[in-house]
Amino acid sequence: MTDNSSKTFVPPSGVERGETHGLASVRVQTAAATGLVYLQGAHVAEWTPQGQSPVLWLSEKTNYQPGKALRGGIPICFPWFGPHRTHQEYPQHGFARTMDFEYVGARLDREGRAELEFVLGENAKTRGFFPHAFEARLRVAFGQSLALAFSVTNRDSTAFDYEEALHSYFHVADVRKIAVSGLCGAKYLDKVRGMAEFTESADELALSGETDRVYDSAASCTIADSLGQRSLRIEKAHSRNTVVWNPWAEKAAQMADFEASAWPTMLCVESANVGPARVSLAPGETHTLEVEVRVSSARP
């Protein structure tokens, strides 16, 4: 997705503001795709390209309340990932996913997709967690492919660093029967095994239990879902990490917003910059993490 922020916002047909589950939202219904974004967290909750079943997974037990993170879709993790490094009482994965973004508007991008834009600036609440002037902006384009660009600009007079992730939950037929390619040879930290470091040796990663890995990888990935008779291609730019996560049965049963029997139907493959790969911005600089998801009907 290229930057076309100078283009005039002329809302394309099929894009409407409203409320969904009591939360402010923007819904997309075009010939190419349907989609849904909540203003809270600029949270992409739905994307279904024409001719496909839903691509994003959303928990049936999601808590639709102001200030509560939604379980599923594509949460934005910013300005830290997981627990805060020094303040364990701070919210998991940062504050962006539970704060209202401003809806800037919609337009057609250069590929004819309905592109929506959302922005979050610093305020009294953010300064309590992150004492810097910043602007965070999400552009998301819905079509036969889904394109996301998450930009952070340093509006402060001093440099700062931050972590980020587009925490993507994908719908699969059975996570025990999928294969993830593109990570072979990459080093990773395994959170399930005490943050030990390993090197991925599999050309196609298969999951057989709880999985929570942070890969040192800027490569694109493919989720081959043979049972679902499709594959998902996840291409990215300016992202040095890929996180692969599924809680499996025992941990899913312990999560209040996760249907205990639903864990086989989801897989998180997240595009991120975390830990040693965190982003450092000088005053006036902007960094943009880009992701594009494409669906094909057969295993590659």
Image (cartoon, rainbow, N blue to C red):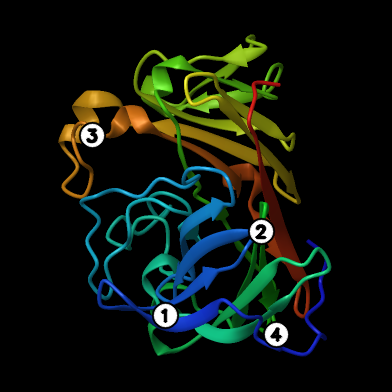
Q: Residue at x 59, y 67 (%)?
A: 30
Dot 2 lies on which element?
A: loop
Q: Residues within 10 Å of mark 1 (few under 14, many from 20)?
A: some
Q: Nearer the viewer, residue 193 or 296?
A: 296
- 53 vs 295, left or right, is left
Q: Can you tell which of label 1 and label 2 is closer to the viewer?
A: 2
The amino acid type of the residue labelled 2 equals Gly
The span from disc 1 to disc 2 (Cα, nearest Å) is: 25 Å
Question: Relative to the observer, which residue lies in front, 290 or 135?
Answer: 290
Residue pointed to by mark 1 = 100
> Residue 64's spot in the image, x, y percent?
24, 67
x then y, percent, for residue 104: 60, 87
Which residue position is annotated with label 2?
Answer: 143
**Which label sits on residue 157?**
4
Amino acid found under the numbered disc labelled 3: Ala
Task: Locate the N terminus by quadrant.
Answer: bottom right
CB atoms of marks 1 and 2 within 8 Å? no
